[in-house]
Image (cartoon, rainbow, N blue to C red):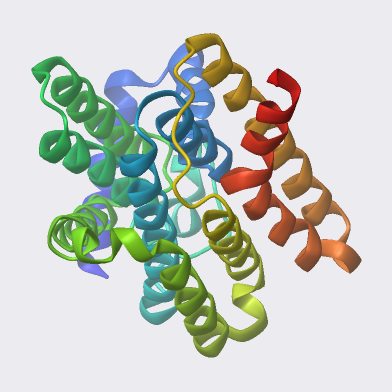
């Protein structure tokens, strides 16, 4: 595609101006924020340290965003810059490029901050985070400019759903999780096993923890956060490395994230 050749030229110009061993390593490290591990850390921090209600809404927003991104990538089958021109490949991935999942994530975080946060400092920080994330994916050679624009467009659409639709269903998240799980398996079958299992576990956990509030003690909140993160990371890693038990491990990861981790902390403290 001619547009891709123009975009590759743009990436080469960026590399000519900025590329150095330090910036290469920095942006490779920064690519961590475009992983499920970072999303789990971000969402757990919101849910267990700051605002459980808003955090759960963001959790489902991220799940839907991930599913939409998978489906769109499979539909468009668009290559990444590094797959066309290996010389721009500071980092390269095997999956398709359009739209950018990182751009979706950055847009969701910035959009949610502008909609929900009162303090301008949070809004500015979220906007800078998003812009930095957009640029990093181009610099690394894993996305074209059009991939980023596509991800931003999808993210804006999801923010609209977040603002208009989520308030209508926020009292029924468990039922929504069950419905979403069924839709995932109906649409993607075994390909959606991972996200479907985690979503089902989250739904069960939310049903069991209905009415649960954040502890008033800050140290207890921090302890809960660490308990949730350690268990969730461990169960997901177990599922990814042992395919025979993957469905069960991922379901338990969702259940631990939404209920069992905080329940264990409560039992220890009492």
Q: Is residue 169 visible?
A: yes
Q: Name the residue located 21 percent from the left edge and 41 percent from the top edge.
A: 112
Q: Is residue 99 visible?
A: no
Q: Is residue 103 left or right of residue 152?
A: right
Looking at the figure, which quarter contains the N terminus?
Answer: bottom left
Q: Name the residue located 90 percent from the left edge and 67 percent from the top edge.
A: 244
- Asked if residue 147 is positioned above or below residue 133 in the image, the reply reads below
Q: Is residue 145 left or right of residue 187?
A: left
In the rendered image, residue 263, in percent from the top left (x then y), is placed at 66, 37
Q: Name the residue located 31 percent from the left edge and 25 percent from the top edge.
A: 16
Q: Is residue 76 left or right of residue 247?
A: left
Q: Name the residue located 15 percent from the left edge and 15 percent from the top edge.
A: 121
In the rendered image, residue 180, in percent from the top left (x then y), is placed at 46, 75
Q: Residue furthest bottom?
A: 186
Q: Is residue 245 left or right of residue 37?
A: right
In the rendered image, residue 186, in percent from the top left (x then y), is placed at 53, 89
User: How many badges with numbers are in the image?
Assistant: 0
Looking at the figure, which quarter contains the C terminus?
Answer: top right
In the rendered image, residue 245, in percent from the top left (x then y), is placed at 87, 64
- Asked if residue 154 is positioned above or below residue 233 in the image, the reply reads below
Question: Residue 267 sits in which quadrant?
Answer: top right
């Amino acid at each position: 595609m001619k547009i891709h050749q123009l975009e590759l030229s743009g990436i080469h110009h960026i590399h000519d101006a900025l590329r150095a061993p330090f910036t290469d390593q920095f942006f490779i490290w920064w690519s961590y924020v475009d992983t499920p591990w970072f999303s789990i850390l971000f969402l757990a921090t919101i849910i267990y340290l700051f605002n459980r209600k808003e955090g759960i809404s963001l959790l489902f927003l991220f799940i839907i965003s991930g599913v939409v991104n998978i489906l769109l990538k499979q539909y468009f089958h668009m290559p990444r810059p590094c797959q066309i021109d290996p010389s721009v490949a500071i980092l390269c991935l095997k999956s398709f490029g359009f739209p950018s999942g990182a751009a979706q994530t950055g847009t969701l975080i910035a959009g949610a901050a502008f909609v929900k946060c009162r303090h301008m400092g949070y809004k500015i920080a979220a906007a800078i985070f998003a812009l930095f994330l957009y640029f990093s994916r181009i610099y690394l050679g894993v996305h074209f400019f059009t991939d980023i624009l596509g991800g931003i467009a999808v993210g804006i659409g999801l923010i609209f759903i977040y603002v208009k639709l989520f308030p209508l269903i926020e009292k029924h998240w468990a039922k929504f999780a069950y419905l979403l799980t069924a839709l995932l398996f109906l649409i993607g079958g075994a390909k959606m096993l991972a996200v479907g299992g985690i979503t089902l576990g989250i739904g069960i956990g939310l049903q069991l923890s209905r009415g649960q509030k954040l502890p008033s003690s800050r140290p207890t909140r921090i302890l809960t956060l660490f308990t949730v993160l350690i268990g969730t990371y461990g169960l997901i890693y177990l599922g990814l490395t042992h395919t025979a038990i993957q469905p069960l491990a991922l379901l338990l990861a969702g259940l631990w994230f939404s209920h069992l981790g905080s329940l264990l902390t409560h039992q220890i403290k009492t």
